[in-house]
Image: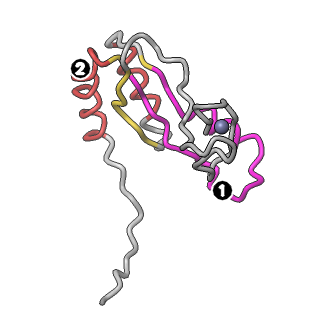
Amino acid sequence: MICPECGSEYREGFTRCCDCDVDLVVPVESEPDAQLVKVYAGTNPAVLPLVESLLDEAEIEFMKRGEAIQDLFAGGRLLGLNPIVGPVEFWVRSEYEDQALELLAGVDESHVVEEEFEEDSPEL
Ligand SMILES: [Zn+2]
């Protein structure tokens, strides 16, 4: 978070600049010229490469977010978090959104991820 007035950086949790008494804003990262849309987000290590290869084959440029975090935690699991930190998000340019969603809809159907449901559903 940064102050739009003086540019001071604040840690998460702060909402106002104590010097200027204005609301803090989330710093805007350098924006790509193309608009990106998220077309997939998942943590299933079996599906992610498939998503990637489908987009590759369709020659849809994509950007992944989340992997850096995974790598970080893979190096040192000191925080007691689940080693699979996710999800990994796939972003494509907005003009490819429909095409990508169509491709990836097939992925979800062919790789139904069975969540671990608790067998004993609590009775109210
Ligand atoms: Zn300020």
Q: Percent from the top left, x then y, of residue 72?
A: 70, 38
Q: Percent from the top left, x then y, of residue 38?
A: 37, 30
SS assignment at label 1: loop
The label number, if any, that marks residue 99 in the structure image: 2
Which image quarter is the N terminus in? top right
SS assignment at label 2: helix
- Asked if residue 16 lies left or right of residue 101, the reply is right
Which image quarter is the C terminus in? bottom left
Residue situated in front as seen by the camera: 49 or 4: 4
Residue 92 lies, with reference to residue 65, above or below; the image says above
Q: Residue at x 26, y 14 (%)?
A: 95
- Magenta segment: does it hold 117? no
The label number, if any, that marks residue 81 in the structure image: 1
Residue situated in front as seen by the camera: 46 or 3: 3
As drawn, which residue projects farthest toward the bottom?
A: 124
Q: Residue at x 57, y 32 (%)?
A: 4
Q: Residue at x 36, y 56 (%)?
A: 114
Q: Percent from the top left, x then y, of residue 94?
A: 30, 19
Q: CA distance from mark 1 to mark 2?
A: 35 Å
- Asked if residue 48 lies left or right of residue 67, the reply is left
Residue segment shown in magenta:
63-91
**Ligand 1 lies in which image quarter?**
top right
